């Protein structure tokens, strides 16, 4: 069975809930259209995200890319709807009240706010990997694990940890195509504290990191580029986007083919 693009996920407001798309376009920065186009920042310009603010997990967020309507608020409380980008000011005031300190909503329509500025393309993981890793925990299923990890492209028709084929050593990238659109796999994603928490409440799952690190080390496939594993709290692949890919589209059902490994500077 061929590797195919099984689902596409973008996160219109950085750190908040994602939405699923049938198809999407690659932006100037290498990210996907609407992915992390908006970000919540405090008065010092720092991101208000799950790493720093546990209450972020308890915010429900729904975004309609066609209309720009954004509905946001506590999962167990009142929510408000704003039309972005025009009503960013009102949305900022609403979230200031929610958090109890001044925040603002910033926008970057061309580049978004990626987590990895050196590998700002879409992140990739296989559906089988999500199922396998969820199986390490009694209380987590594959859907919840996806919400914890927040990938962009989920690949079907392949074995667990297939995505570990998309990177090599620190001096190389692995070229691959999605429906003929070219990307370059760079490195396995280093995980922060966010995947250790329930995506709806922010409650930490006891022993999540320790179990993950232990199982990841023992199940790391032979094709994984071990040069990256100074520690084993890594999963999912960060990518780069060649200039020719900007403006191209990818869609659910696209076949994925792995190409050659080349020097990172090529």
Image (cartoon, rainbow, N blue to C red):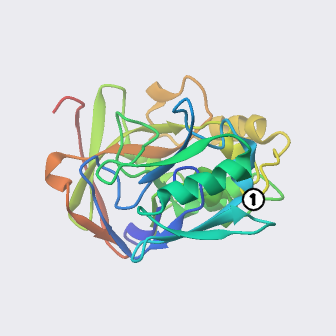
Quadrant that contains the N terminus: bottom left
Label count reads: 1
- x, y percent for residue 235: 55, 43
Going by the image, does 92 lie left or right of 261? right
Residue 256, visible in the rendered structure? yes
Q: Dot 1: within a 10 Å radius of its alpha carbon, few (fewer than 14), some, or many (20 or more) residues?
A: some
* Residue beneath disc 1: 200
Q: Is residue 246 above or below residue 164?
A: below
Going by the image, does 118 lie left or right of 46? left
Give the residue drawn at x 86%, y 42%: 206
Residue 135, visible in the rendered structure? no
Give the residue drawn at x 37%, y 35%: 117
- x, y percent for residue 112: 38, 49
- x, y percent for residue 225: 43, 34
Q: Quadrant of residue 257?
A: bottom left
Query: Of 159 and 135, which appears nearest the observer?
Result: 135
Quadrant that contains the C terminus: top left
- x, y percent for residue 185: 34, 44
Query: Of 247 and 178, which appears nearest the observer?
Result: 247
Query: Of 89 and 236, which appears nearest the observer?
Result: 89
Q: Quadrant of residue 46?
A: top right
Q: Is residue 12 above or below residue 15?
A: below
Query: Of 131 and 246, which appears nearest the observer?
Result: 246
SS for tag 1?
A: loop
């Amino acid at each position: 069975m061929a590797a195919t693009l099984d689902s596409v996920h973008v996160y219109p407001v950085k750190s908040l809930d994602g939405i699923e798309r049938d198809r999407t376009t690659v932006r100037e920065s290498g990210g996907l259209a609407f992915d992390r186009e908006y970000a919540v920042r405090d008065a010092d310009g720092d991101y208000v995200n799950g790493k720093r603010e546990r209450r972020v997990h308890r915010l429900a967020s729904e975004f309609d890319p066609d209309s720009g309507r954004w509905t946001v608020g506590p999962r167990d409380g009142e929510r408000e709807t704003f039309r972005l980008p025009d009503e960013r000011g009102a949305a900022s005031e609403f979230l200031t009240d929610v958090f109890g300190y001044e925040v603002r909503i910033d926008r970057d329509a061309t580049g978004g706010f990626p987590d990895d500025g050196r590998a700002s393309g879409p992140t990739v993981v296989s559906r089988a990997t999500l199922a396998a890793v969820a199986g390490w925990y009694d209380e987590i299923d594959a859907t919840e694990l996806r919400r914890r990890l927040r990938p962009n492209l989920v690949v079907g028709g392949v074995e667990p940890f297939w995505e570990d084929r998309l990177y090599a050593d620190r001096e190389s990238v692995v070229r691959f195509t999605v429906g003929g659109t070219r990307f370059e796999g760079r490195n396995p994603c280093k995980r922060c504290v966010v995947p250790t928490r329930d995506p709806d409440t922010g409650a930490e799952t006891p022993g999540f990191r320790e179990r993950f690190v232990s199982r990841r080390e023992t199940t790391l496939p032979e094709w994984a580029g071990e040069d990256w594993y100074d520690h084993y709290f890594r999963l999912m692949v960060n990518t780069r986007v060649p200039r020719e890919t900007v403006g191209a589209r990818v869609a659910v059902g696209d076949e994925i083919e792995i190409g050659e490994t080349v020097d990172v500077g090529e």
